[in-house]
Image (spheres, helix red, strand yellow):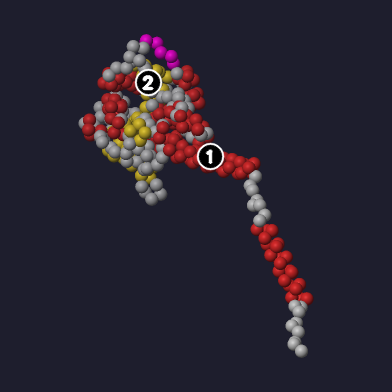
Amino acid sequence: MMPRKNAPSQSAAHSAAAAGERGAGNSSTLSAPPQTVSGKWLAKAMGIALAASAGCAWGALCLLFWQGGWQLLYHPEQAITRTPASIGLAFQPVAIGATEAGEPRLRGWWIPADAAGRFSRYTALYLHSENGNLSHTLDALATLHTTGVNVLAFDYRGYGQSQFARPSEARWREDAEWALNYLTGTRHIAAKSIVLDGKELGANLALELAARHPELAGLVLESPSETAVDAIFNDARARLVPAHILVRDRFELDAPATALRIPSLWFFKATEPLQPILYQKPTAFEKVTSSKMQVWFPRFPEAKKESIEAVALTHWLGDLQ
């Protein structure tokens, strides 16, 4: 008899069936449709990303304005190209406001009055404008010297050879206080014989300083500005950022003018060559309750302006004495 072949076992049949089922299941999974992203969710995500990008850009713009906006108001120069010796005035270089390491923060000039100077008992502390440096003040210093007073002029930090720092109203106040302390502490000059003299933005600073020091002799202001910081706030870039929060400088005139208690002389320049003699008085001048005098002069050549200032200063100092 021929031997009979063994039939496949039931377990083998079950395994094959299971494998077939798994294969069928895998085929079903691979053929399922892919998931899609909701258009609403995608639009929302894109909106958030754009808003975040805009916020970062605006924040960067605010930072740049905070760091560089001061250049709209202050225009310092470092190179000293002229000294009082350039116009024949004897002077001494001075160092003011030493740091803990002994390095001076401010550099300036001391110009002594002539021995026979009529007002040699007075010393003028000169606060220059926001432009240039001491090299650009020689005409004003010569006018002061002509009247017969001693003169101390200095550069703010960030100007000329003074310590490098970004200019600001707070730093200017500190610099002016250091210069005043130099006169009273180092040179032992009585406060009652010190006259503050400021030009343009330096005039605003001089008014602030004078309001805090009623012990001083007097105050001279040349072309103070009632809208000093408009140079910053009226700039097109300032409209894109919260400029009034980022910029602390104000240089206001009205408040210190109201608080002023010492005699003052105010110089104003006409804006047009043929303006009439009667001018509108600035608001700040009207708020001064102490002795005051104002001088307006038309737009003459600079030499004529300097002579008018010298005559007015001489008359005012005579009354002061």
Give the label on residue 267, or none.
Answer: 2
In the image, which is nearer the foreground, mark 1 or mark 2?
1
Count neighbours of disc 2 (C-alpha within 10 A) and say few if under 14, some if 14 to 19, many if 20 or more: some
The single residue placed furthest to the bottom in the displayed view is 1
The single residue placed furthest to the right in the displayed view is 10
- The image quarter containing residue 172 is top left
- The image quarter containing residue 176 is top left
Q: Which residue is mark 1?
A: 54
- Residue at horizontal 29 percent and vertical 17 percent from the top: 300
Q: Is residue 279 magenta?
A: yes
Count neighbours of disc 1 (C-alpha within 10 A) and say few if under 14, some if 14 to 19, many if 20 or more: few
Q: Looking at the picture, does residue 118 appear above or below residue 186? A: above
Residue 56 visible within the image: yes
Q: Position of residue 94 (x, y in %)?
A: 31, 40
Q: Position of residue 138 (x, y in %)?
A: 28, 30
The part of the chain drawn in magenta is 276-281
Q: Looking at the picture, does residue 29 appear above or below residue 148? A: below
Say which of 319 and 103 sits in front.
103
